[in-house]
Amino acid sequence: MQPAKPVSSQLAIIAAAFGCGEALAHTISGLGRGGRHGRGQVLYPLPDREETSLLLEGLAQEAAYGREGGVLVLHQFGPGEFYGNLIDHGGDIQVEALSDGHALHYGEDTMLRLMESYGGVAMAVARQLARRLAMIRQRMVEATLLSATGRICAELLRLSRKSEDGVIRPLPVLAELAQRVQSTRETASRTVSQLERRGIIQRRDGGLAVIAPHRLEEMIY
């Protein structure tokens, strides 16, 4: 596994996630149980653990599994996002690590006390939930109205906008990309290859750079 981020970087992530200043972030950090995990590990649900966790490093995904083996990816998230009992409670939801990572784990009572004691914390959690619901709604619209190629282009554009330089890091795993947009690895591979040949995207510095976002957006519809 990769070495942990510096404490200052972790405090900045905690402060942003909980909507608080550095002093309170330091206190909140001490209330959590830190732990590292490996790629492919199931992060939620875990037996006998009623916890909400804050991802500090790595990537993970929230997925629903059907009785017949079908998989629906609901959300992919990274550092600064919550998962666990408070966020994902109920149903057949599972959170699994897409890379090695590190998280802080909070007991349910601890999270509720923080939200009751600090209005900013409650607002920050509520805003994150609202953003996640909006993303799920957007995916439902795309699944109904867009072709598989369009959904792949929309996801690549969305991922590129998370970085200042338009580079998706790490390089997307095609099977995971296809799963997120309810397509196949073959379709994802073919679409990415076509985009590369047209100069719309380019492999760069261990990632995938979107060179012409306006052209990528045109291919969504």
Image (cartoon, rainbow, N blue to C red):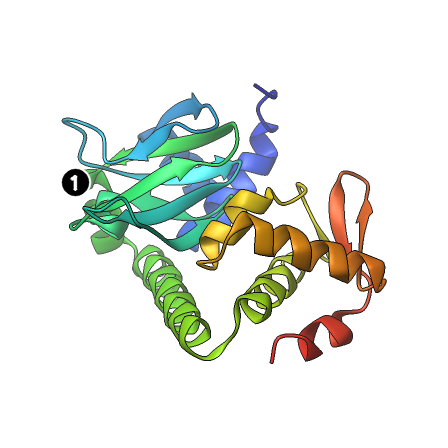
Q: Nearer the viewer, residue 125 or 90?
A: 90
| Number of numbered discs on residues | 1
Left or right: residue 178 compared with residue 46: right
Circle 1 SS class: helix
User: Residue at left 39%, top 27%?
Assistant: 41
Q: Position of residue 123 (x, y in %)?
A: 34, 63
Q: Where is residue 67 in the image (x, y as percent from the top left)?
A: 18, 46
Q: Quadrant of the C terminus?
A: bottom right
Left or right: residue 4 compared with residue 51: right
Q: Which of 98 and 20 is in front in this view?
A: 98
Left or right: residue 92 compared with residue 17: left
Q: In which quarter of the image is the N terminus?
A: top right
Q: Where is residue 214 in the image (x, y as percent from the top left)?
A: 75, 76
Mark 1: few, some, or many residues within 10 Å (few <14, many ≥20)? few
User: Residue at left 53%, top 66%?
Assistant: 148
Q: Which of 196 and 81 is in front in this view?
A: 196
User: Residue at left 40%, top 23%?
Assistant: 35
Toward which corner of the image does residue 53 lie, by quadrant?
A: top left
User: Residue at left 21%, top 54%?
Assistant: 116
- Res 22 seen here: no
Residue type highlighted by circle 1: Asp
Left or right: residue 145 compared with residue 53: right
Q: Position of residue 129 (x, y in %)?
A: 34, 61
Label 1, on which residue? 109
- Res 61 seen here: yes
Q: Eyeballing the image, is 67 above or below 43?
A: below
